[in-house]
Image (tube, helix red, strand yellow):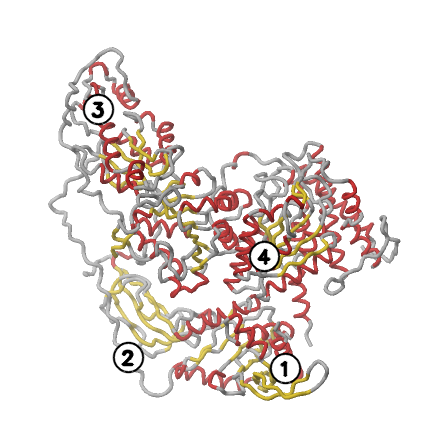
Amino acid sequence: MAPLTYLQAISAALRDELRDDERVLVMGEDIGVFGGAFKVTDGFVAEFGTDRVMDTPLAESAIIGCAIGAAVVGMRPVCEMQFADFISCGFDQLVNVAGKMHYRQDLAVPITVRLPSGGGFSGGPFHSQNPEALFMHSPGIKVVAPSTAEDAKGLLHAAIRDPNPVCFMEHKHLYRRVKGEVPEGIYETPFTARVAREGSDLVVIAYGAMVEVALEATADLDGASVEVLDLRSLVPLDEAAILDSVRRCSKVVIVDEANMTCAAGAQVAALIAEKGFEDLDGPVVRVATPDVPIPFSPPLEHAVLPGVDRVKEACRELLEY
Amino acid sequence: MSSSSTETLVDVTMPQMGVSVAEGTVVGWRVGVGDAIVAEQTICDISTDKIDTEVPAPASGVIAEILVDVDQTVDVGTVMARISVEGGAAVPNGNGTPAPAAAEPQASPPAAGEPAPPVGAPARSGGPGRRYSPVVSRIAAEHNVDLSTVEGTGRGGRVRKQDVLAVVNGTNNGHADGAVTDPPLHIESPYRPDPPAPVSAAATTVIDGGLSRMRRTIGERMKQSLDTAATCTTWIEVDMARVEAARAKLGVTALAFVARATIDALREHPALNAWLNGEDYARHEFVHLGIAVSLGEDGLIVPVIHNAHELSVEGLAARIKDLARRARARELSADDVLGGTFTITAPGQFGSIMATPIINQPQVGILDFEAVVKRPVVVTDADGNDSIAIRPMTIMGLSWDHRALDGALSAQFLATVKRRLESLPS
Amino acid sequence: MATETAQPAGGPTPESEPAHPEHLQLEDRIWLMRAMLLMRGIEERAMSLYRQGKVPGSFYDGYGQEAVSAGAAFAMAPEDRLCILHRDLAAHLIRGVTPTRILSQYMGRAAGITRGRDGNVHFGDRELGCVGMVSMLPDMMLVATGMAMAFKLRGERRCALTWFGDGSTSRGDFHEAMNWAGVQRLPVVFVLENNQYAYSTPLDKQFAVDPVERAAAYGFTGVTVDGNDAEAMFEATLEARTRAVEGDGPTLIEAVTMRMHGHAAHDDMKYVPKEQVEEWRRRDPVERQERRLRDAGVDVDALRAEVTAEIDAAATEALAGPMPTPDDVLDGVFAAEAEPLGDGRAPWSGYAARAEATVAGGDA
């Protein structure tokens, strides 16, 4: 075990996979010699060479499309979108070519797309987005979103070893803020939810950076026993774990950083309404970013992104209900 | 670690390092009797005529017996040592996820007793138009509770799940359904043993003078080849100008181009891509190309590029580089050195220009590629005029087995290699 | 099959077609003919089934373009990989997909290549090294580029090939694929199937410069080929493949041809001048290959009869096959394990490999 940051854990997973499996290559813009916009692949070229740590042309559609081609002839490509926002330029290849391939013609597409996502640092409308729900709505693509260093490494191993396209949502805000004990070597974290803290009065369901927000907001809520459920995986969505928390706690606050409408949290809310209705002791409450582009200036950005205070307030309201 | 009645012994046997290997020699033990060992930890080093390797422990436990001495050669499958395993289960030490931590005691403990009713929200019972949540209605129905009699502690006196459960359980504990952590018991100690300390590697045994095992093996093999084959050597001169230009463009060694041309020539002349083993003669459809790699004073090894015919020049270059690196790092597996159908040796980096290589049995040919040196040669232009030019030239030697083929074919083979190298696109 | 009957060539232009004897043996040239006849015959039968209400959805065919896919696919080796477009049925046939499975595919039956999950020509047999197209064109240019990237990274003497149309040259993925393949000098062959119309849009509304000229801008070779000549297509593709596996990078082949039917079954193509259709009808690729073979003494009538009988039998078998049941309609969205593409295995797939084997067999 070694204490690693979330960022170091992602690097470690990539390095371990490159060492372990010659089919693995990482490809993206500025990831080679420069080491990536967030230095995830810093120093990789020296160990693995420029073929396996590939600086690509500035072409997101081509990065995903070429990864698909390499995957169907036996490689295990890991693509980096420099920012998750840029996946819009590779959307077609991911959704129409990769996502539908196996269903149509039994041809697996084992690619991983790393998506540095999320806001909170004045990235503005094009460097702050959380596009995960787009891919939840597209059949054939798995979506995972770790909140801890240990899960960042284990989920990335599992994503690379999964025979399907996997979107790996890595939250930029967590890169250096989150640190934790990370097992050495290769281990796969299952695509299931994790109880981050047990409780019985209310459950906060979150993923990615919002798990930390939820834990902090509910650490001391007038003595209430608040559970925090870290989804970890959005596709597949761990229905059993969600419904189990609802059954025990009966009050639910769902937090996601993405824009509110049709976000991952909306799917969770719908699931609870459909299958957890009999266990509810209050309305399902959502905390999310309103349906606006993420503004640049700090007071504006702070006003729209869910923070500790908003989550705290929502939990208090519901606990009193 | 105390022994118990349930302990069993797990055998450590001489492994089969490749199909043709029948025996192996223990080079050194990393542990002694009584030492603890963890599964997958190296227990001893062995040497076979194909490969030197480490033998990992098949189980965790304590070394009970060592049955084979250093330098002793035994058949594959012979028990070399026994490990005493407690409980009888040989559990390999995987690298999986550690067991999840127990419930975190620091997580907010269930509040004792009833939560204080919210200020300004006096408990009320009854009242027209009262609504109940799905879970409250369900619990009330299941337990026959008249909700109109239940005191509500929620906002505006709303009956909450805790309120109806308090009635059902005959208590006012709002956390009846909540998680309860078991208190620690007196006999439970938080102590956990440290993982076993890594066993320090035994001091390397100094092998006494004389030739290394590898040297002796090479010597036996080479003598045996000369005793077996009717070895002849044929040479040809090749103009390497095109190769030099092409290799500079691709950033690879000339050897990769020679390998590619050799593969093409072998497919044109399959009589050289063959094995002759006593009476048995077999031609191969596929080319598994051996490349001799010098290990300095220790000797040399011939790793094999399997299915080399499927590889481009760049692919061959990458494989040659990889095999040479692994050979020098002593990381070759047994499979890496098996199955060659033809061999290339290229010792020309020190400037030597000709050699008479010895055939790697049971193959029937070996190509020697030496230094490329600039020499004056006669060149003929398109109009048939001769002149003297300075060209990068090399002399390639083919040692071939006269039992399997004749000189004309070996010359044709060399001519094919030459033609392919000299006709690369300029 | 072949007899000594020397017949005068049929059709309105009785001049002899020059053959390409550099690589193709008579047997190969008959295979090319057979692939084109099968393609035309299967598509005609499918259109007939469409009109009988047996084929759901819409129907697309490649009438008049048979030489493009037949000639190009024939030059590829089994270990090569193909991304095939919707007017390239002959490529599937050359890789070894049977007429029964193709007709089942059109009819959405259980025995179709996608088992009813996708329609018409949206299929690729994984085991035969083919990836089925998607409707977003030319997405598969990037997939083929990625395959070639893998071949180059692994140092394999293999090649990827894909077809796309004139309309595709306007899309960004065309640029991204051409640029990437040029930058990395990848072993990929891009076949631009210029059939004059993208749905109803003519060339002069699609581009200002012939796209074959763009190849030079991306740093590799571009050639224009008579797309209605199967043997010329074969020769150009074989040359491009050789260039690819020798490490000399990609090739853009512009196959000039004509879409002789509407974009799909519903399209009466009133937007195409009649004279243009007439002019191209005289260059019919099937008839041209037929003239060559008749000149060489092949009994083409017998070949035609044989192909027709094969299609009749395939149609009967396909019609007798069941529709898929919805029991497993939710299965297979995700893969349980990754099985990559396999090699083609048809006897006439892989001219390139056979050519190498022939050379290798020529022992002195």
Q: How would you rate the neighbour count of disc 3 (Cα within 10 Å): few for under 14, some for 14-19, many for 20 or more? A: many
The answer to whether tags 3 and 2 share a subunit is: yes
The answer to whether tags 3 and 4 share a subunit is: no
Please tell me which residue is depicted at 80% across the width and 48% down the height of the picture: C282
Residue type at numbered disc 3: Leu
In this picture, residue A23 sits left or right of residue C61 = left
Measured in 3D between alpha carbons, the distance from the residue under mark 3 to the one under mark 4, in whole angstroms, is 68 Å
Q: How would you rate the neighbour count of disc 2 (Cα within 10 Å): few for under 14, some for 14-19, many for 20 or more? A: few
Measured in 3D between alpha carbons, the distance from the residue under mark 4 to the one under mark 1, in whole angstroms, is 36 Å
Q: Secondary structure at mark 2?
A: loop
Q: Secondary structure at mark 1?
A: helix
How many numbered callouts?
4
- The image shows residue B10, relative to residue B340, as above or below, that is above
First in sequence: mark 3 vs mark 2: 3
What x and y, as percent, mark residue B404?
62, 81
Query: Given contact means CB atoms under 8 Å apart, are the residues at marks 1 and 3 in contact?
Result: no
- Observer-side mark, 2 or 4, equals 4
Mark 4 sits on what residue? Answer: C160
Mark 3 sits on what residue? Answer: B165
Residue C312's image quarter? top right
Mark 1 sits on what residue? Answer: B410
